[in-house]
Image (spheres, rainbow, N blue to C red):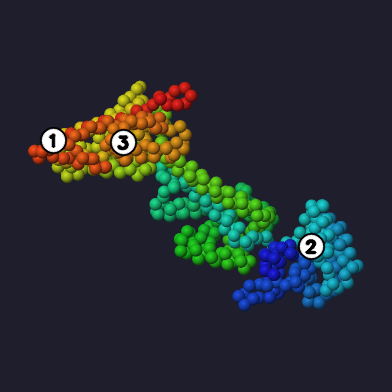
Amino acid sequence: MKIKEIEMKSGIDRATIYYYEKEKLLLPHRTENGYREYGEEDLITLQRIKLLRSLHLPLDEIRSLMKGNGSLRDTLSKQIGQLKKEEEDISYAEELCRTIYKETPHYSDLDAEKYLKQIDTISKEKGGRYFKVQDELPMVFDPRIRFAARIIDLFLYGLLWNFIRTFLLHQNVLDPSNTERLILWGMALFLTLILEPVFLALFRTTPGKFIYGITLEKEDHKRLTLEESFQRTWGILSKGFAFGILPITLITLSISRIRCENGQIQPWDEDIAYRIKDYRYHRNLLAFLALILVIGMNFLLSVFYYSPPNRGDLTVEEFVENFNHYREAYDIDLGEYTLKSSSAWDSDYDFRKHYLPSHLRNAPNFTYSLRSGIVTAVSFNVDVRDTDFYVDSYSNYMILMALALTQPESVFDTALNAHKIIGPVGWEPFKPFEFSEMGVTLINEVEYEGFENNFDYMRPETNDSGEWDNSYRQTFTVERQSMEEGGEYR
């Protein structure tokens, strides 16, 4: 039998079994690979130890019985006298001692399973703790449970950091750079150091441990102090995670897993009672659902990220803030131009621009239609004549103008429908169109002569005389729609 099977059959946890081995009360067979192999004799020995410890016999007395240095009857007679001196109710233990005394003269004949069933029955009926003898502080050695609980906690702390990134730093949590991924990992560990001691000191558990029914406390069932909780968490991060230095972290995690498999207590868990309520499989389902929930929350954060920072009626300054937000959100290239809160363009000085015509040297000037200080429409005009230079596409400006002025009906609206603006405008910036989406109407009026449409720019053509006789006119307008009764735009 492997350790898990003998745990189940004997009803003794792994830590206690290993403790009995350390005390030389149990000597399991070792395979060539060093793994323990338990036989039926080991199971009988454990059952006998459990029974006698349930009767509060000291381990030294049990060891003497196993070595044949004492009589079972003499030992039980002595124990009966000792039990009478104790203050708590030991009547059933005394009765059981007398029963065993009468029925079993020798240790080798002791049928522990028979009496353990009687003890389990009376314990359930009376709800007492007398027969629950613990030879070692409880500990959870299953590395899968411990790792899963830790992963849930790290995901939650990472979610908290993503909240900060979304609402304070205005960053997209679903498209992080490699640097942002490293920062996320570091912040998850940092928040672990800050928050886990608080959870343990106040609630004896953390969110991940709570799902698995795990509590951490002192031997006397008291809460860990904040200082003790912090020291434990510091030990985990330093010795178990190597402060998040990934190559070393993989090594330290492997060492921790081996400790668990060998029934060794982790350095940060010494003198701590690590209790688990049960090992039911539904807890794995709860853990899986918790991870799905965290992932879903991260998706919702990205939805919030794509929502405009300003909704409802917009001033010019708020329109500009929306404009710049979407420029960053969708990573739209405007070159060196930046729209300032005053609605003027700012750009770095470049002497080469002096050799370019005005339509290539400057960003389009926005014209605002206002009603009581509220923006109702934004437009720009381009008028180019008799030039030998190309006319570049203004699609990026057009897209940002439209998105900045939209009136999304919900936080999901922009994330789900922005492509209905980005696609048509991006693909056909030189064609006339008019359509409405998300509470705005986009009107593109384009007339040109002597230019060839090359998708993202207009190339000038010469006339029969070899002269540049051409013209390009564009007026692009984004208008806000008013809302009719019933919640529809018109």
- Decide: is 450 above or below 235: above
Residue linked to disc 3? 398
Percent across and percent down for residue 466 are 9, 40
Residue linked to disc 2? 54
Percent across and percent down for residue 442 are 34, 31
Q: Residue at x 25, y 35 (%)?
A: 364
Q: Name the front one of labels 3 and 1.
A: 1
* Type of amino acid at the residue the image marks with label 1: Asp
- Decide: is 312 above or below 47: above
Q: Residue at x 22, y 38 (%)?
A: 362
Label 3 secondary element: helix
* Front residue of this view, candidates 293 and 90: 293
**Quadrant holding the C terminus:** top left
445 left or right of 13 in image: left
Label 2 secondary element: helix
Q: Residue furthest front?
A: 464
Q: Name the front one of labels 2 and 3.
A: 3
- Decide: is 399 above or below 148: above
Earlier sequence position, callout 2 versus callout 1: 2
Percent across and percent down for residue 60 are 76, 71
Q: Residue at x 41, y 44 (%)?
A: 171
**Quadrant holding the N terminus:** bottom right
* Type of amino acid at the residue the image marks with label 3: Met
Q: Residue furthest left?
A: 465
The 10 Å Cα crowd at callout 2, few under 14, some 14 to 19, many 20 or more, is: some
Separation (CA) of disc 2 from disc 1: 106 Å
* Type of amino acid at the residue the image marks with label 2: Ser
Residue linked to disc 1? 469
What is the number of the mark on residue 139? none
Quarter assignment of residue 78: bottom right
| Count of all numbered marks drawn on residues in the image | 3
Q: Residue at x 30, y 38 (%)?
A: 428
